[in-house]
Structures are given as structure tokens and as C-alpha cells.
Amino acid sequence: MAFVAHILVLNELEQHQAMYALKVQRRRLRDIYNPFDLREYDFTKLFRISKNLALYIIDKLSNVQRLQRKRKNGLSLQLQVLVAIRFFAFGSFQRCVGQDYLGSISQPSVSRCITRVATSLYEVCLSDWVRFPQNDSERKAVEI
């Protein structure tokens, strides 16, 4: 009986080590890859926006506290924004967004990126990009 328990513990330890190794490998892949190294055409095809617009959005959100790294190995602001933009552009499954080109980002991380970036865009950029008519003359001008 002790032998079986020992084998089970060793098996669990081996699985834990394999998961840790995969996590480290994913992090290395993610950190090496820079989407801004792509040609403009490929970048636009991937995100459905230009590099300049992506950089503008990243710059607008650069002072948002919720998007700053909380851990040494956390996702950068640039990566969080690009993950969210990719999801917004295609409306794909979150798991696919994190695993297709960005070097294996987990689905929960993708979900957090989408939530944080969407909330930040709403708070920071809404007044710059969306303006509703304030009086009757502005409403009539929009109706025309």
C-alpha cells in the first residue's frame, strides 16, 4: 500500500513539474514575440486596426492603474491591449485569442484583459470618441 501511495505522489510531482515547465515556456514565447515587428498589412489583418491606432490606444491607456503589471511576470500594457483588440476585432473564443499568435495566454488571463481594457477604454476615451447631441439643434443636425 505504501508503494502505491509513493507512486501516486511521484506521479503528481511529475505532473506539477511538467505544468511549471510549460508555464515557463509559454511566458518565454510571449515575451519574445512583438506584434509590432509584423508588416503593417499582417498587423492590420491580425487586429483589424493599424499599428498607429494601436499605439495611440496604448498611449491613451498608459496611465490607467488597473492595466499596470501587478506581478513581475504579468502581462504588459501593450499585450493586454492587443489581446483585447484581437478579441474585439473577431469576437472569437477567448481561448483561441490567447493561443493563436500571442504565445499561449490562458483563457482567464484573456478574460481579465478584455474586462480591464474595455472598462479603461470606456473611462478614458468615451468622451473623446463619442459625443451625444446636447440640445435640439444638435439633435436635428444629426437626424439630417
Image (cartoon, grey):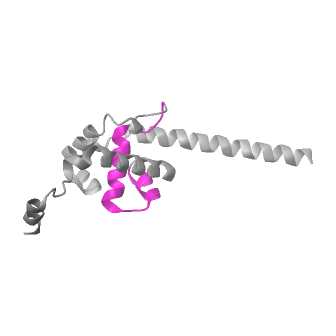
| Quadrant of the frame with the C terminus | bottom left
Q: Left or right: 55 with respect to 120? A: left
Task: Indicate whether residue 91 is drawn in magenta.
Answer: yes
Work out whether 42 lies above or below 10: below
Residue 105, position as x, y percentages in the image: 46, 48
Visible residue check, residue 78 = yes
The residue sitting at 31% across, 49% down in the picture is: 122
Horizontal and vertical percent position of residue 115: 42, 50
Residue 137: horizontal and vertical position, in percent? 8, 61
Say which residue appears at 63% left-offset and 43% top-offset. Answer: 18
- Taken as a whole, is the magenta stretch helix, strand or loop? helix
Please indicate whether residue 59 sits to the left or right of residue 137 in the image.
right
Frontmost residue, 24 versus 67: 67
Q: Is residue 69 above or below residue 134?
A: above
The outermost residue toward the bottom is 144
Instruction: Kindly indicate the quadrant of the structure image that contains residue 88.
Output: bottom left
Residue at far right of view: 1
> Can residue 104 be seen?
no
Q: Which residues are magenta?
A: 72-101
Residue shown at 49% from the left, 32% from the top: 71
The residue positioned 39% from the left and 35% from the top of the image is: 65
Can you name the residue that lies furthest to the front here?
Answer: 136
| Magenta stretch holds residue 89 | yes
Q: Nearer the viewer, residue 103 or 68?
A: 68
* Residue 49 position in % (x across, y down): 23, 53
